[in-house]
Amino acid sequence: MSLFKFWEKEENLFNENITIEETRFVVLDTETTGFDYTNDRILCIGALVLQNNIIKIEESFEIYIEQDHYDESTAQIHGILKDFIVKRPTELEALEQFLNYLGDSIIIAHHANFDITMINRALERNGLPELKNKSLDTGVLYKKTLIKSHLFERKDHYALDDLADKFDISKKDRHTALGDAYITAIAFLKIVKKLREKKEINLNQLFKL
């Protein structure tokens, strides 16, 4: 699928009648050189397909991107070294591969705004339009599972580690793009299960919680 045909599919991005199980979700995470949308760059994109309550490991996506920008302080977190021996495509080549993988799926990410904004800035640098896909943020959805009580004060933000601890998810590959995407995918399934303990939830309602 060409990049131009990808954006022509915008009108088909969301069907309110489709169930959560039928929907093709792409759960993604990015590792970056930092948190500055203008000056920092994406080091790696990791993603997994989630459909029919199954995380499709065999359809995983992981790509490391060629770049000149390097930050030693963030390398201590993600472990991607400057001389990391991996064949890296250019940013444009990586984006094209990712867009073909993503298609018209709904994006799931933890603190999704950061990852999507970083990807959109990369698209902009390469003269391409922003993503049109709808997205769900596991950080936001998780807060909807918490019981309101004067004895329990909810935090403004919940880290991915918080969700991993809450749902007893292994953090073995934490701070790798694909590892974090996997943790996020499991957390999403757990969140949907908890939400359904209160009432039946369909895909459209997930966006209105």
Image: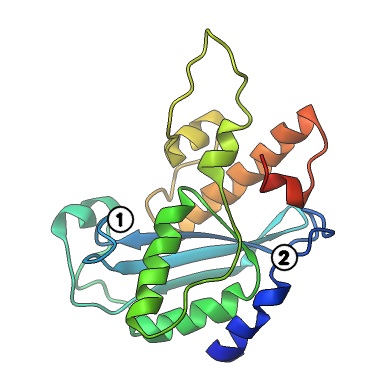
Closest to the observer, 59 or 102: 102
Residue 209 is at least partly visible in this image = yes
> Does residue 181 sit above or below 138 in this rendering?
below
Are there few (<14), some (14-19), or many (20+) residues within 10 Å of tag 1? some
| Image spot of residue 209 (x, y percent) | 66, 39
Mark 2, mark 1: which one is toward the viewer? 2
The residue under the point 58% across, 76% down is 101
The residue under the point 61% across, 61% down is 134
Closest to the observer, 53 or 109: 109
Q: Which mark is residue 95?
A: none
Closest to the observer, 168 or 159: 159
For the residue marked with disc 2, what is the amino acid?
Phe
For the residue marked with disc 1, what is the amino acid?
His
The residue under the point 59% across, 73% down is 102
Closest to the observer, 109 or 79: 109
| Image spot of residue 177 (x, y percent) | 42, 59
Residue that badge 1 annotates = 78
Q: Is residue 18 left or right of residue 168?
A: right
Residue 88 is at least partly visible in this image = no
| Image spot of residue 158 (x, y percent) | 45, 34
Q: Is residue 160 left or right of residue 40?
A: right
Furthest-top residue in view?
151
Are there few (<14), some (14-19), or many (20+) residues within 10 Å of tag 2? some
Furthest-left residue in view?
72
| Image spot of residue 19 (x, y percent) | 82, 55
Q: Which mark is residue 14?
A: 2
Residue 193, image quadrant: top right
Q: Is residue 137 left or right of residue 209?
A: left
> Does residue 184 sit above or below 200 in this rendering?
below
Residue 57, image quadrant: bottom right
